[in-house]
């Protein structure tokens, strides 16, 4: 279905073209800045945009990783890791943010450092209409429950944003979500 | 036929009296009151909210402190909200995490409606199916005494024990209201700077 839509509307594919070559290595740099920030624990719900980070953390013997059945598990696990002295990062997709709202009362109320990286859906060249409502509500929902929300639209900006977000989260006890714009991720291909 | 149940506070007191340095996380509602009633301590982390989070906070804590035992004491209603957590914990396979489900088979905080465990769901069986290394359902305080000895022995992976407790609303024994203070004193107990 998707392929036929692309064939009929090639201009749509052009607008959603893949990031430039220089942008393609941002996941490696995000991994580097997270490691430099002392992250030794990671939880995730799989997402194509997080593929490289999941692989790099999974292969890192210094990092404990957890695959989750639903995103809010990662919020509670990150709080437990901080109680025990580890810095954790949670990876999810924007659709999963909706699952997290009540659990986010834990880091917000108890002032647990929290760093969440969210790959966006439903905002740029999205083919699946079911992704649009939560994608459009992601930033407002996170702000409503009390998180700081940062966005990045380019690889370089993302790397810098993640580095400073990690500093604010773990040194200033902030709860921060970094939204990775769908434009940066490029069009999802099946 | 009514199967036997046990007094929740006596059972929890037994577990805590033999905690042997274990770190304790409690699920919101009565389990937090039960643990607080047994004696407030810096190495208790109580939840007043974050429904479904107790076992997972326990997982993160167990992974961050692999040399210490972590005991999560929560209720059937709280754990039902985190059914998938049993899969996540089983896959993570911590050897130092024990889940205690205080099961009165009711949603005791909200009017004593019958819960899923009162309708046949056995958390010990679910956890066993997920791959927990040891599970059991206990119905007497004598069995809790045996469990206290069991918990002191090394485990091959996460363990889950269901304690069938009497459905009653006991007087509340409220933990500190300030979750930041509870967090900071817990971390200070582990030797972390809180400023």
Image (tube, rainbow, N blue to C red):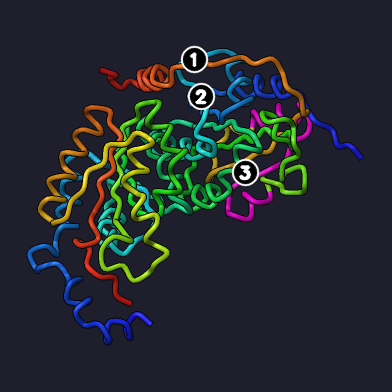
Residue B139 picture quarter: top right
Mark 2 and mark 1 in contact (Cβ < 8 Å)?
Answer: yes
Nearer to us in this view, A19 or A166? A19
Q: In the rendered structure, does residue B133 fall within the stretch colored magenta?
A: yes
Q: CA distance from mark 3 to mark 2?
A: 18 Å
Expressed as whole percent of the image width and height from the top left, the position of residue B162 reads 68, 38
Say whether residue B154 is visible. Answer: no
Q: Which mark is residue B176?
A: 1
Are tags 3 and 2 found on a single chain?
yes
Q: Which mark is residue B46?
A: 2
Say whether disc 3 or disc 2 marks the residue closer to the N-terminus. Answer: 2
Q: Which chain's residue wears label 1?
A: B
Say whether disc 3 or disc 1 marks the residue closer to the N-terminus. Answer: 3
Structural crowding at the residue carrying mark 3, measured as other residues with C-alpha within 10 Å and reported as few (<14), some (14–19) or many (≥20):
some
Q: Which chain's residue wears label 3?
A: B
Structural crowding at the residue carrying mark 2, measured as other residues with C-alpha within 10 Å and reported as few (<14), some (14–19) or many (≥20):
many
- Residue stretch rendered in magenta on the structure: B125-149
């Amino acid at each position: 279905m998707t392929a036929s839509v692309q064939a009929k509307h090639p201009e749509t594919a052009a607008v959603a073209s893949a990031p430039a070559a220089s942008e393609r290595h941002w996941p490696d740099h995000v991994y580097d800045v997270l490691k430099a920030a002392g992250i030794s624990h990671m939880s995730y719900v799989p997402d194509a945009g997080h593929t490289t980070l999941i692989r790099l953390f999974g292969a890192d013997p210094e990092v404990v990783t957890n695959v989750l059945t639903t995103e809010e598990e990662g919020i509670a696990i990150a709080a437990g890791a901080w109680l025990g002295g580890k810095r954790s990062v949670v990876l999810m997709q924007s659709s999963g943010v909706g699952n997290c709202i009540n659990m986010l009362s834990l880091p917000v109320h108890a002032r647990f450092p929290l760093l969440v990286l969210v790959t966006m859906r439903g905002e740029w060249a999205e083919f699946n209409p079911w992704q649009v409502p939560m994608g459009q509500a992601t930033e407002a929902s996170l702000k409503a429950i009390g998180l700081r929300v940062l966005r990045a639209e380019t690889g370089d900006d993302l790397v810098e944003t993640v580095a400073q977000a990690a500093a604010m989260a773990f040194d200033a006890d902030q709860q921060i979500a970094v939204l990775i714009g769908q434009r940066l991720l490029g069009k999802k291909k099946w | 036929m009514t199967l036997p149940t046990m007094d929740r506070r006596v059972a929890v007191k037994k577990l805590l009296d033999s905690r042997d340095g274990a770190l304790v996380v409690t699920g919101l509602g009565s389990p937090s009151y039960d643990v607080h009633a047994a004696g407030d301590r810096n190495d208790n982390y109580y939840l007043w909210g974050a429904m479904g989070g107790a076992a997972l906070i326990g997982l993160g804590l167990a992974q961050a402190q692999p040399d210490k035992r972590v005991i999560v004491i929560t209720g059937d209603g709280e754990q039902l909200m985190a059914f998938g957590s049993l899969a996540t914990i089983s896959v993570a396979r911590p050897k130092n995490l024990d889940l205690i489900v205080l099961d009165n088979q009711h949603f005791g905080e909200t009017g004593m409606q019958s819960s899923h465990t009162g309708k046949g769901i056995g958390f010990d069986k679910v956890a066993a199916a997920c791959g927990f290394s040891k599970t059991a359902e206990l119905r007497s305080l004598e069995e809790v005494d045996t469990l206290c000895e069991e918990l002191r022995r090394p485990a091959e992976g996460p363990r889950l024990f269901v304690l069938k407790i009497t459905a009653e609303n006991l007087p509340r024994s409220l933990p500190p209201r300030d979750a930041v203070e509870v967090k900071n004193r817990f971390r200070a107990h582990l030797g972390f700077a809180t400023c």
